[in-house]
């Protein structure tokens, strides 16, 4: 589905003092408590995140929200694909609202359904693998349209916690995996499964045959779309070397959306939830350097004053997650109180049904 641009919420909101905004959100939340559930992704800024009834990574939030069926309005403080996943999993009487329509995920937007559909026959012809023996796997950070394509073609969604498991399933299910949109998650998972470098090939958008030779593709087991997360791409091996030189006792943990050179140098890699659990399980007095979005790293530092916690890389803020400001949350809640749900995210039923197949397949693996 395509998202329209966010409308201007007006001068009466933009002129409000920060404290007044927070107080008004708290009051609206109380007033709407019977019908409202606020979901907050870990990368949200603190003054939005503090109002979340449920917090977590994208899939955890969507699944937990769908289980709470007595709440009609799910206000998702996250990005487009998360709100779409919540709508796919939600009951018919539930409505998903995104506080700011500019909150998309640039990485998810790097693989559109049209581009993936166009690449599919090209890959089949160049690799000599019949379409039905190519298994598509999409990271949950993808549009509902792409998830639907994957569902229609016998593939599965994966998350950053289960990418290896899903890739192993796909290796058993077919002859070639087409993985999108995040090349880094795909590469890290493939190497963790023991695949050799020449069995993992990059498909470059816009180039004939994805810039691959027939020879490259004849050896490939996994073909990676060339998407990436610009936030996690800001971490380089030099950052790991810097922190190790500063502090020999440090444990470096990074998200698998980081490039493989960084993941290899780290002590651990893990999904957002994996990072949270690892730090929580760390001994008092332990030292951590974390390679992921800065709002999460700062929050972990606040929650664990008994540990020393730093961000691996300066400036790792996700700008689209940050598009949701407290005032946007207030604007959505004020409109709800006036009986006017705004910024609804609604996946068309046929797309939702196909996308659901790819999510259900993942849950069955
Ligand atoms: S941190 Fe990266 S993957 Fe996550 S929403 Fe931002 S751009 Fe997308």
Image (cartoon, helix red, strand yellow):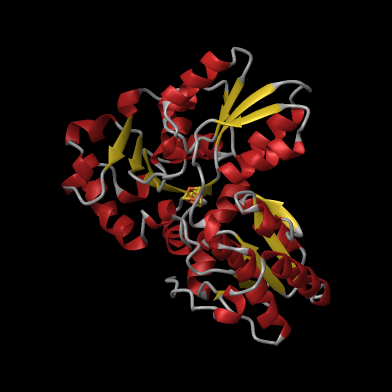
Give the left or right position of residue 132, taking residue 24 as reference: left
How many circles with numbers are drawn on the protein? Answer: 0
- Where is residue 282? Give x, y as percent: 74, 25
Q: Quadrant of residue 34?
A: bottom right
At 41% from the left and 54% from the top, the residue drawn is: 106
Viewer can see residue 320: yes
Viewer can see residue 95: no
At 55% from the left and 78% from the top, the residue drawn is: 9
Q: In which quadrant of the rendered image does the N terminus lie?
A: bottom left
- Where is residue 110? Give x, y as percent: 36, 54
- Where is residue 65? Give x, y as percent: 71, 62
In the displayed structure, 38 sits above or below 56; it is: below
The front one of 20 and 3 is 20
The front one of 87 and 330 is 330
Give the left or right position of residue 177, taking residue 341 as reference: left
The front one of 159 and 345 is 345
- Where is residue 155? Give x, y as percent: 46, 50
At 73% from the left and 83% from the top, the residue drawn is: 337
Q: Quadrant of residue 12?
A: bottom right
Q: In which quadrant of the rendered image does the C terminus lie?
A: top right
In the displayed structure, 86 sits above or below 251; it is: below
């Amino acid at each position: 589905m395509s998202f329209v641009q966010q409308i201007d919420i007006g001068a009466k909101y933009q002129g409000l003092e920060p404290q007044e905004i927070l107080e008004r959100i708290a009051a609206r939340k109380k007033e709407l408590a019977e019908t409202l559930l606020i979901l907050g992704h870990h990368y949200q800024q603190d003054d939005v995140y503090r109002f979340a009834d449920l917090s977590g990574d994208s899939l955890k939030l969507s699944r937990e929200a769908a289980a709470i069926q007595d709440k009609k309005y799910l206000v998702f403080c996250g990005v487009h694909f998360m709100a779409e996943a919540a709508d796919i999993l939600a009951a018919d009487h539930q409505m998903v609202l995104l506080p700011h329509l500019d909150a998309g995920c640039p990485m998810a937007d790097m693989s559109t359904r049209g581009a993936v559909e166009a690449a599919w026959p090209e890959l089949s012809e160049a690799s000599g693998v019949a379409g039905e023996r190519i298994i598509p796997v999409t990271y949950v950070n993808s549009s509902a349209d792409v998830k639907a394509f994957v569902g229609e073609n016998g593939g599965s969604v994966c998350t950053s916690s289960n990418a290896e498991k899903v890739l192993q399933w796909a290796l058993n299910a077919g002859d070639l995996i087409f993985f999108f949109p995040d090349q880094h998650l795909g590469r890290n998972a493939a190497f963790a499964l023991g695949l050799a470098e020449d069995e993992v090939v990059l498909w470059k958008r816009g180039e004939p045959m994805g810039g691959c030779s027939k020879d490259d593709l004849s050896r490939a087991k996994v073909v990676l779309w060339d998407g990436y997360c610009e936030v996690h791409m800001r971490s380089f091996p030099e950052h790991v070397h810097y922190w190790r030189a500063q502090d020999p006792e440090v444990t470096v943990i990074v998200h698998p959306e980081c490039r493989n050179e960084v993941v290899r140098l780290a002590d651990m890699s893990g999904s957002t939830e994996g990072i949270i659990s690892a730090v929580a399980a760390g001994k008092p007095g332990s030292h951590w350097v974390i390679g992921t979005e800065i709002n999460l790293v700062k929050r972990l530092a606040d929650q664990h004053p008994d540990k020393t916690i730093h961000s691996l890389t300066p400036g790792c803020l996700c700008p689209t997650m940050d598009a949701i400001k407290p005032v946007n949350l207030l604007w959505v809640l004020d409109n709800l109180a006036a009986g006017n749900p705004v910024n609804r995210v609604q996946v068309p039923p046929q797309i939702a049904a196909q996308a659901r197949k790819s999510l259900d397949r993942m849950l069955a693996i």
